[in-house]
C-alpha cells in the first residue's frame, strides 16, 4: 500500500485504518469506507523504517503501542497498536492550515491569540478540530509578536514557523 498514492486518490480522506490481513478502511466525510486492499506485513515494516524509526519500533514491541508523526508531502499522525494479536495502525492525515477553509470563529481565535498570560484548554472528541484550532492560534501568535511558545503534546502534530 503506497500512502502517497492513496492520499492523492482520496484527497478528502482524513483517516486510514489498517489491521494486518484485514481490508483497509478510510474515513471520508466522517464515514468509513472499506477498500479491496488488505493490510500486509510490509506496510507495517515500511511505517517503522520510513516514518517512525527504530526507537518507536522498540517502544511498540515493549509497550504494545506507539505514536508518531511524519513529514512528507503530508503530515500524518500515526498510532501503532495490536488488535486481537495482529498489527494495527490508525493514521490521521493532518491538513495544512492553508488548505482548510477559514475558521468561522476567527474573532475568538484572535482574542485567544492576544492573551499574554494564563492557560487555554481546547477539548473535544477525536476529529473535532482541537489540533487545527491550536495550530491556528499559535500561527496567529507567531505572526504578531516575538515570543517563545511552549506546547505539551506527544506527538507534535503541527510545526509552526517562527515569523518573529
Image (spheres, grey):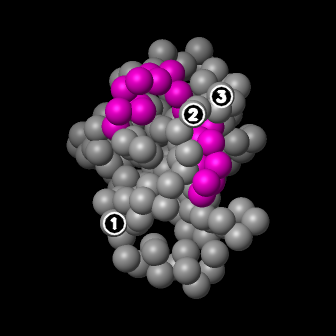
Lateral position of residue 119 relative to residue 67, left or right: right
**In the rendered image of this protein, does residue 152 appear above or below residue 106?**
below
Q: How far across and how far down the image is residue 76, in percent?
A: 44, 46
Query: 18 or 57: which is nearer to us?
Result: 18
Query: Counting residues from the N terminus, which is met first, the one under dot 1 or under dot 3?
Result: 3
User: Dot 1 corresponds to which residue?
Assistant: 49
**In the rendered image of this protein, does residue 105 appear above or below residue 56?**
above
Question: Which mark identifies residue 36?
Answer: 2
Q: Which residues are magenta?
A: 4-26
Lateral position of residue 17 relative to residue 31, left or right: left
Q: Nearer the viewer, mark 3 or mark 2?
A: 2
User: Dot 3 corresponds to which residue?
Assistant: 33
Q: Quadrant of the C terminus?
A: top left
**Magenta span includes 12:** yes
Q: Furthest-bottom residue in view?
A: 62
Q: How far across and how far down the image is residue 26, in percent?
A: 59, 34
At 59% from the left edge and 41% from the top edge, which residue is drawn?
24
Question: Which mark identifies residue 89?
Answer: none
Amino acid at each position: 500500500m503506497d500512502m502517497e498514492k492513496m492520499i492523492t486518490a482520496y484527497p478528502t480522506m482524513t483517516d486510514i485504518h489498517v489491521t494486518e490481513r484485514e481490508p483497509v478502511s478510510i474515513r471520508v466525510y466522517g464515514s468509513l469506507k472499506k477498500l479491496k486492499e488488505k493490510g500486509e506485513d510490509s506496510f507495517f515494516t515500511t511505517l517503522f523504517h520510513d516514518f517512525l524509526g527504530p526507537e518507536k519500533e522498540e517502544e511498540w514491541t515493549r509497550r504494545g503501542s506507539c505514536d508518531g508523526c511524519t513529514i512528507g508531502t503530508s503530515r500524518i499522525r500515526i498510532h501503532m497498536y495490536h488488535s486481537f494479536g495482529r498489527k494495527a495502525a490508525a493514521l490521521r492525515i493532518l491538513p495544512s492550515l492553508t488548505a482548510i477553509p477559514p475558521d468561522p470563529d476567527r474573532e475568538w481565535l484572535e482574542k485567544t491569540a492576544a492573551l499574554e498570560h494564563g492557560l487555554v484548554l481546547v477539548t473535544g472528541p477525536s476529529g473535532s478540530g482541537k489540533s487545527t484550532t491550536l495550530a491556528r492560534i499559535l500561527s496567529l501568535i507567531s505572526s504578531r509578536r516575538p515570543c517563545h511558545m511552549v506546547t505539551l503534546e506527544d506527538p507534535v502534530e503541527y510545526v509552526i514557523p517562527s515569523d518573529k
